[in-house]
Image (spheres, grey):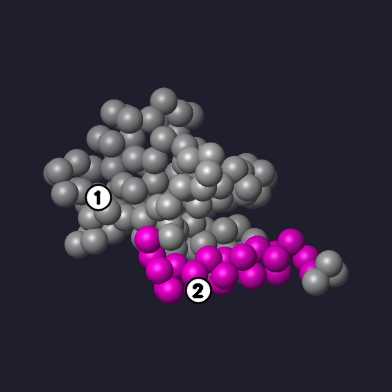
Amino acid sequence: CAAHSGATTMYTSAETIRLLLEIDPTLAILPDHFGRTPLNLFWESHRDVLCRSVDDFREYAELDEESLNFLDLELSELYWAAKSLLKASNTNKNTFQMLHTVINLVDCPDEFVFLTIKMNRIEAQQVDERGNLSLHVLCATRDSEISKR
């Protein structure tokens, strides 16, 4: 296993996350003994990959799953692992909007918000259950570089 690349390791982690959440989705919201959820730990563990990778995609107006897989497999696996955690921790089981969800998370890295905007451009025009666009939520809740762009 030590000879595997970072992308292979990330793929293994993403698949393991998906499998565990298929068994019990409530695992995504259970805190550890320090009060951190799996999503908190995920952001801490992968912030460096996000920061390094997202700058490479600023020139793209939008990304889709296929192009992200082709351009950066490690970042693609990170995105899908995070999406699995976010879906499992979603309290409103009737709807799930990736863009609205990440914007509402205080500890979500700005780089992941940026990537989510690129991957979910159509959601920018959709309202959440309160009637807010993602731009409303972004401007009201996040003090970040993203909301200043």
Q: Is residue 12 magenta?
A: yes
Residue at which label 2 appears: 19
Q: Tell me the crowding category of disc 1: few under 14, some 14 to 19, or many 20 or more residues within 10 angstroms, Cα based.
A: few
Q: Is residue 53 left or right of residue 28?
A: right
* Secondary structure of residue under mark 1: helix
Percent of width and height locating residue 149? 44, 31
Question: Which residue lies at the image location 83% right of the left edge and 67% below the top edge?
Answer: 2
Magenta-drawn segment: 4-26
Circle nearer the viewer, 1 or 2? 2
Residue 21 in the image: above or below residue 105: below
Percent of width and height locating residue 121? 36, 54
Quadrant containing the N terminus is bottom right
Amino acid type at mark 1: Gln
Amino acid type at mark 2: Leu
Tell me which numbered mark, 1 or 2, is placed earlier along the sequence.
2
Residue at which label 1 appears: 125
